[in-house]
Amino acid sequence: MATEKAYKLLAKQEGISNSQAKSMIDRGLVYVGNKKVMIARGEIDERTIFRVQKIEKAKPIFENDDLIVVDKPAFVNSDEIERQFKDARLLHRLDRETSGVLMLVKNEEFRIKAIKEFAQDKVYKEYIAWVEGIMTEPIEVDKPILTTKKNNRAVSNVSPKGKPARTEFFPDIVSAKKTKVKVIIHHGRTHQIRVHARYIDHSIIGDELYGGRRAKRVMLHAHKVRLLGMEFVAPEPKSFVTFE
């Protein structure tokens, strides 16, 4: 059986460069059948036919003289969104596979004002997630989080040496050993919801880094944000509504 590196084979199939093909695999967008291709440099049968998941475009939600708010699709880095808007800077970030409300600011005066609101925990942040296991009662986790970098990748854990972090989980729908939850976060540390979900043995589905089963994506969506008297809502993705 003749083999070829997965990214090279994908590049030929899609008519793209090797680096573009490698990036697509690294993002988790490439499948063989229903199995995600995990290793770009892995050897694979050269007769393999790949299926590539298309990325949706960021949808604008709101814009004024101070900020632009978009509904970020999954599989896109926040920095890539920033590059689409030349005169705006990210006010905060969402993880690559997290979708939903993402805010960019247009001027320094508003940025300083908004950052102060975040620092004082005056920004309301509501997420929707599908988590492992059955959650029947609301759960609050008030545990500090410490973030370290390994191989240029951020990893967070509950630790007494960490920074304050509080997360509230509210069960919505229970379905076959998994629960759809509303999540409200305070502070907003790196991977806060993902770490606190694992801490209570309800890892987010698709979040293999923090104990979730494999899925097409990390099932976490930034649904609603309130900042300085304004409210922004990113509709729940179809994949969340129909997830079984």
Image (tube, rainbow, N blue to C red):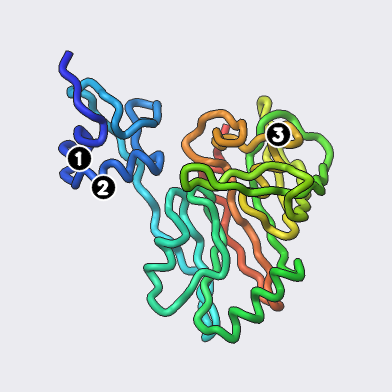
The residues bearing labels 2 and 1 have C-alpha atoms spaced at a distance of 8 Å
SS label for mark 3: loop
Amino acid identity at mark 3: His
Residue 19 position, x and y percent, is: 25, 46
Residue under label 3, please give it: 202
Residue 10 location, quadrant: top left
Count of marks placed on residues = 3
Side (left or right) of 62 relative to 229: left
Residue 173 position, x and y percent, is: 71, 38
- For mark 1, does the 10 Å Cα neighbourhood hold few (<14), some (14 to 19), or many (20 or more) residues? some
Q: Residue at x 55, y 39 (%)?
A: 242
Amino acid identity at mark 1: Ala
Q: CB atoms at circles 2 and 1 under 8 Å apart?
A: yes
Side (left or right) of 227 relative to 170: left
The residues bearing labels 3 and 2 have C-alpha atoms spaced at a distance of 35 Å
Q: Residue at x 19, y 47 (%)?
A: 17
Residue 48 location, quadrant: top left
Q: Is residue 229 above or below residue 17?
A: below
Name the mark on residue 11.
1
Residue 174 location, quadrant: top right
Residue under label 2, please give it: 20
Amino acid identity at mark 2: Gln
Of the two numbered discs 1 and 3 on the same chain, state the one appearing first in sequence. Answer: 1
